[in-house]
Amino acid sequence: MLKKIRVNLGRRSYGIFLKEKILNNFISLLRSATHSKRFVILSSEPIFKIYGEMVKETLGKSGLKFHVILIPDGEKHKNSKTLLFILGKLAQFNIQRDGCLLALGGGVVGDLGGLAASLYMRGIDYLQVPTTLLAQVDASIGGKTAVDFHGIKNLIGAFYQPKMVLIDPLVLKTLSDRQFKTGLAEVIKYGVIGDERLFEKIENNLPAILKKDPEILKSIIFSSCRIKSKIVSMDEKESGKRAWLNYGHTLGHALEAHFKYKTLTHGEAVAYGMWFSSKLSFRLGFCSASVMDRQRILLKKVGLFPRLPRFDPGAVLRKMFLDKKARNGQILFILTRKIGLVTIQKNIPRQIILSALNQLQAEASES
Ligand code: GLY
């Protein structure tokens, strides 16, 4: 059965549609989302090899014209060079204002596709067709588009909403376990920030989730997308509650950067970040020990805590202060009050952050 969620942003509202095999049958949804007649499928080579034919066939049998742009796989290609390559191809194909880009892939393809669509002829329509769990529950929703620049992640970007998001839980079958788990970290995050029942569902059904059972996957993806769309609908440009989505990310981003994006996946870094934030929440009296422990136990059971190489807590702390989300020299932390409820806090004394980091280092690092 088709499940739908609406992101409510006035004239820029759009639907998220979730169904098995949706890539075989999305033309009526497409027609209600865009008036475009010419499409450009943007994908990466490995993803296109698996799902390209399906999308081409669906567009082709409805008589819709399309072109294909393939970009290399991997975060290191999320840069201005690839962006210009895509824009060049759109020009070469003579795509006009009524063109529409379909981003088929993970977060890199989605971020690049969205940004290229926002720039080309001052903006053409685009659709998100995410093929990783991380992109399905996070990057494809909410219109954050960007490339990395001058060594800084997402430095050049725009808020530019897609016309539709199409999610097929079955595509996750081909995802590696580690990549699947990285997405699961974000799903757990949604439980912590806004839905205790989702958190409990993951606690109670972990073996089926790890086996990628389609029914349970559909249910947790749906709950995650619902929370994200609700938050984005309230605060599109992150002037307030959208920051909740950064739960675990303040330390997560700093750890990813500290280890040069080689040691930890995004989800593993965020899992450590959630563990850390829940520790801070407990120490500062925002939550009980059981709220902290439930998070650590679930993240550990999923397998999101690989041993960390030893690190300098002071250096990681400095990275947190460099984060572009740190404001006026203050780091914003999202802290847990209970499972399903978080709060935004700044002004946490540096000493408390450093001592929690020291504890994390002792518990998580290789000796
Ligand atoms: N990934 C966080 C956000 O979309 O705001």
Image: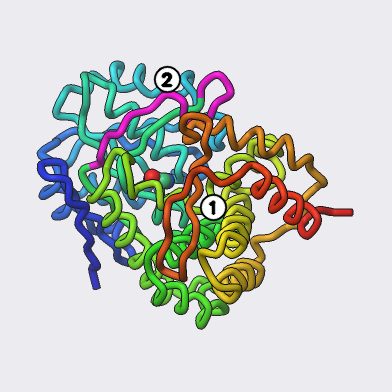
Residue 179: x, y in percent?
57, 55
Image vertical order of residue 168 relative to residue 355, above or below: below
Query: Does the magenta stretch mainly form a helix, a strand or a loop?
Result: strand
- Residue at figure coordinates x 38%, y 30% from the top left: 69
Q: Is residue 152 magenta?
A: yes
Q: CA distance from mark 1 to mark 2?
A: 34 Å
- Quadrant of residue 114 in the image? top left
**Viewer-closest of 141 and 104:** 141
As drawn, is 71 to the left or to the right of 33?
right
Disc 1 secondary structure class: loop
Q: Which residue is mark 1?
A: 248
The label shown at residue 85 is 2
As drawn, is 119 to the left or to the right of 278?
left
Disc 2 secondary structure class: helix
**Viewer-closest of 314 and 242:** 314
Question: Where is the N terminus found, in terms of image quarters?
Answer: bottom left
Task: Assess disc 2: are there few (<14), some (14-19) or many (≥20) residues with their C-alpha within 10 Å of its C-alpha.
Answer: some
Label 1 near ligand 1 (CB < 8 Å): no
Residue 210 visible in the shown view: no
Q: Is residue 4 magenta?
A: no
**Viewer-closest of 293 and 257:** 293
Amino acid tagged 2: Phe
Ligand 1's quadrant is top left
Amino acid tagged 1: Gly
- Quadrant of residue 74 in the image? top right
Image vertical order of residue 157 relative to residue 9, above or below: above
Task: Assess disc 1: are there few (<14), some (14-19) or many (≥20) residues with their C-alpha within 10 Å of its C-alpha.
Answer: many
Number of marks present in the image shown: 2
- Residue at figure coordinates x 48%, y 60% from the top left: 189
The magenta segment: 149-162
Question: Where is the C terminus found, in terms of image quarters?
Answer: bottom right
The disc, 1 or 2, on the residue closer to the chain's N-terminal end is 2
